């Protein structure tokens, strides 16, 4: 790590900020060269994912460091839970840039501590370096799912409903607010949108129910349409979305009602970290039950259909296709 008077060296950073968060049994409290992989409970499969976030790309340089840590954890947790897996353990890699001074690192570690506890992740190890470039953070997360029950992208069938949890577009609007696209604003009523951008809420409780009914699933990180196109591509099918059924939060609606083009644009916005899944008509009661049990809003927004694999059509109220001019709309 480059010499910086206002920042701990690598060893002090690990010792003072990361060791207190680590798993003692399997992570050996980060006091050794390796950790152990915790045993996978019998009847379960382990699955693994890794997501990186980069300053200036996935978070803004002046975002609060606690929220950056939580975003790092949550984007990974989102990948696990959208497959029906329960988060179990993780490894952290940080390349900390010049802006990450001691105060920043302490706040980052505090945010990390919160979310490791919130989502039940044991910290097993990692790596820490300094960089003259943007701060770059990566988590490798391991989850457990009932053996053979992992919900893939590839299982959608013609006639399945397309469902999404929560609301779409909040994070995309939050980013626009932070980027000043709506002018210089007091963050008052717009704060929920900014919060959604900075700290996604992975649908951990609902995700556990997915293996019971979902034919395919993923988390919405690239934008609703592009992500549905991923399911369609892997399943060799197309899908139709009813634009009027796409759920928007009341905060989002305040921005969107004036601007239909913006409403269409946020379908491609990304960063929602909601679960998008498909399920057969026979699953309706189980979905409603999971939604009620976990207090998670679930909306049926369309259906899986035959057609060009990967094509997603967005239909207006009168059933006519909207040209939303974005990736995922059509590969034709
Ligand atoms: P080495 O130089 O032998 O790779 P390190 O000093 O990099 O060892 O790491 C010492 C221990 O601290 C290892 O167990 C490593 O996994 C852990 N570690 C280092 N950085 C982090 C981090 N950012 N988060 C979690 N664990 C870390
Ligand atoms: Mg190392």
Image (cartoon, rainbow, N blue to C red):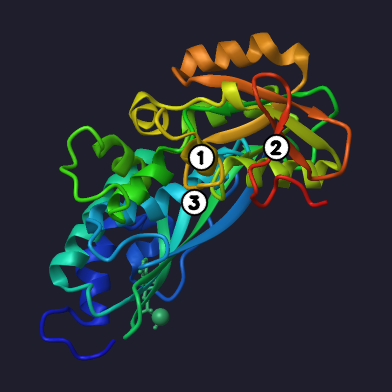
Gap in Å between the C-alphas at discs 2 and 1? Answer: 34 Å
Going 43% across and 45% down the picture, which residue do you hit? 172
Q: Of marks 1 and 3, which one's residue comes earlier in the chain?
A: 3
Residue located beneath label 3 in the image: 76
Q: Position of residue 71 (x, y in %)?
A: 37, 51
Residue 120 point in image, percent of width and height: 40, 42
The label number, if any, that marks residue 261 in the structure image = 1
Q: Are marks 2 and 3 in contact (CB under 8 Å)?
A: no
| Residue 298 to residue 94: above or below | above
**Closer to us: mark 2 or mark 1?**
1
Q: Is residue 204 left or right of residue 275?
A: left
**Percent x, y for residue 255?**
36, 33
Q: CA distance from mark 1 to mark 3?
A: 31 Å
Q: Residues within 10 Å of mark 2 (few under 14, many from 20)?
A: many
Task: Tell me the number on the disc at residue 151.
Answer: 2
Q: What count of labels does the image hold?
A: 3
Q: Nearer the viewer, residue 71 or 253?
A: 253
Judged from the image, the secondary structure of the residue bearing numbered disc 3 is: helix
In the image, what residue occupies the spot 49% across and 12% down? Answer: 292
Q: Residues within 10 Å of mark 1 (few under 14, many from 20)?
A: few
């Amino acid at each position: 790590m480059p010499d910086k008077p206002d920042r701990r060296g690598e060893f002090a950073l690990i010792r003072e900020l990361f060791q207190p968060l680590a798993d003692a049994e399997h992570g050996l409290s980060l006091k050794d060269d390796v950790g152990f992989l915790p045993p996978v409970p019998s009847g379960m499969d382990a699955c693994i994912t890794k997501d990186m976030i980069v300053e200036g790309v996935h978070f803004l340089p002046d975002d609060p460091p606690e929220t950056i840590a939580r975003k790092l954890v949550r984007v990974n947790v989102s990948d696990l839970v959208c497959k029906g897996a329960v988060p179990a353990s993780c490894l952290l890699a940080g390349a900390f840039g010049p802006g990450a001074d001691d105060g920043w690192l302490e706040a980052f570690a505090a945010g990390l501590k919160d979310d490791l506890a919130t989502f039940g992740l044991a910290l097993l190890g990692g790596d820490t370096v300094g960089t003259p470039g943007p701060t770059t953070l990566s988590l490798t997360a391991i989850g457990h799912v009932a053996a053979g029950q992992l919900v893939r992208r590839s299982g959608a069938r013609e006639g399945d409903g397309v469902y999404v949890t929560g609301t779409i577009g909040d994070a995309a609007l939050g980013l626009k607010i932070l980027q000043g696209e709506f002018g210089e604003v007091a963050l008052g009523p717009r704060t929920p949108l900014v919060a959604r951008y900075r700290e996604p809420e992975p649908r951990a409780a609902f995700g556990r129910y997915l293996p019971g009914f979902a034919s395919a699933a993923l988390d919405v990180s690239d934008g609703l349409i592009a992500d549905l196109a991923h399911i369609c591509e892997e399943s060799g099918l197309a899908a139709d979305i009813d634009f009027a059924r796409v759920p928007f939060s009341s905060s989002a609606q305040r921005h969107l009602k004036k601007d239909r083009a913006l409403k269409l644009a946020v379908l491609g916005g990304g960063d929602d970290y909601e679960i998008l899944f498909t399920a057969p008509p026979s699953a309706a009661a189980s979905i409603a039950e999971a939604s009620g049990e976990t207090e998670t809003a679930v909306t049926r927004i369309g259906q899986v259909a035959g057609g060009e694999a990967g094509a997603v059509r967005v239909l207006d109220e009168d059933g006519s296709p909207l040209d939303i001019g974005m990736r995922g709309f059509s590969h034709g």
